[in-house]
Amino acid sequence: MRAVGQIAIPFPFEFDQQTWTNAVYENAVGEGFVRVPWRPMTGRSGVLKAYFHSGLAPAEAVCACFCLSH
């Protein structure tokens, strides 16, 4: 987080894990990869947690989870 005067402004990818996961969910729904309500399978939850700790942006995590690899 950087401070401007007395106001702290978070960097774009500085999220707590719950906020980050919500952003992944919203992005996945918005891109049409999943439909509401969606709950990740147990294995997928672990993968998302690893993506979070690796520093991926939510959109990058969606691509890694749902896009076809070539």
Image: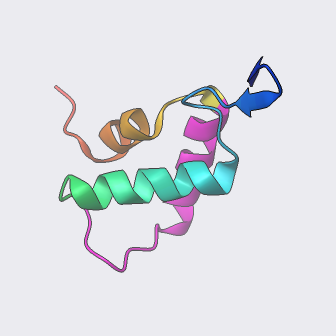
Task: Indicate the quadrant where residue 1 lies.
Answer: top right
- Asked if residue 61 lies in the magenta stretch, the reply is no
**What sort of colour scheme is used for the picture?**
rainbow
Residue at the outermost front position: 5
Which residue occupies 76% across, 31% down? 7
4 versus 43 height, above or below: above
Residue at the outermost bottom position: 37
Q: Is residue 46 visible?
A: no
35 vs 47, nearest the viewer: 35
23 vs 6, nearest the viewer: 6
- Asked if residue 41 lies in the magenta stretch, the reply is yes
Residue 70 shown left or right of residue 44 in the figure? left
Residue at the outermost right position: 6
38 versus 32 height, above or below: below
Which residue occupies 76% across, 30% down? 8
- Residue 33 position in % (x across, y down): 22, 58
- Residue 26 position in % (x across, y down): 37, 58
Residue 2 shown left or right of residue 6 in the figure? left
Please report the bounds of the magenta region as a residue range: 34-53
